[in-house]
Image: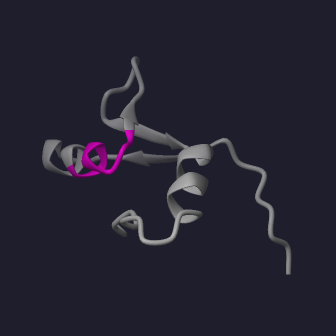
Amino acid sequence: MPTRIAAMAVVVDAKQDRAAAFYRHDGFMPLQTQPSRLFVPMRSIVQLLGQPGRRRMRRA
């Protein structure tokens, strides 16, 4: 089973301001041209998941 993924970021489209706040709380950043579209770099996810005892990102 492959252990690598060719991706630069995880992107979400927040349908409401409350949803956008939820994602920003977990480190997602809004795109400048589309504030309701947020992203988090894969590097951040790898760092978060690779450190035992750290809080995991919540699932949407």
Farthest residue toward the top?
33
Q: Can residue 25 be found in the magenta stretch?
A: yes
Residue displayed at 67% across by 41% down:
8
Q: Is residue 2 left or right of residue 55?
A: right
Q: Can residue 9 be found in the magenta stretch?
A: no
Quadrant holding the N terminus: bottom right
> Residue 42: where, in percent of width, then height?
61, 47
Residue displayed at 37% across by 25% down:
34
Q: Is residue 54 left or right of residue 24?
A: right
> In which image quadrant can residue 31 be found?
top left
Q: Is residue 17 left or right of residue 59?
A: left
| Up/down of 56 relative to 8, above or below | below
Of residues 53 and 43, the one nearer the viewer is 53
Of residues 27 and 51, the one nearer the viewer is 51
Farthest residue toward the left?
18
> Residue 50: where, in percent of width, then height?
59, 63
Please report the bounds of the magenta region as a residue range: 22-28
Residue displayed at 36% across by 44% down:
27
| Up/down of 48 relative to 59, above or below | above
Farthest residue toward the bottom?
1
> Residue 2: where, in percent of width, then height?
85, 73
Q: How was this image coloured? A: one colour
| Up/down of 16 relative to 3, above or below | above
> Residue 24: where, in percent of width, then height?
28, 42
> In which image quadrant can residue 3 be found?
bottom right
Of residues 59 and 34, the one nearer the viewer is 59
Of residues 35 and 59, the one nearer the viewer is 59
Residue displayed at 38% across by 42% down:
28
Quadrant holding the C terminus: bottom left
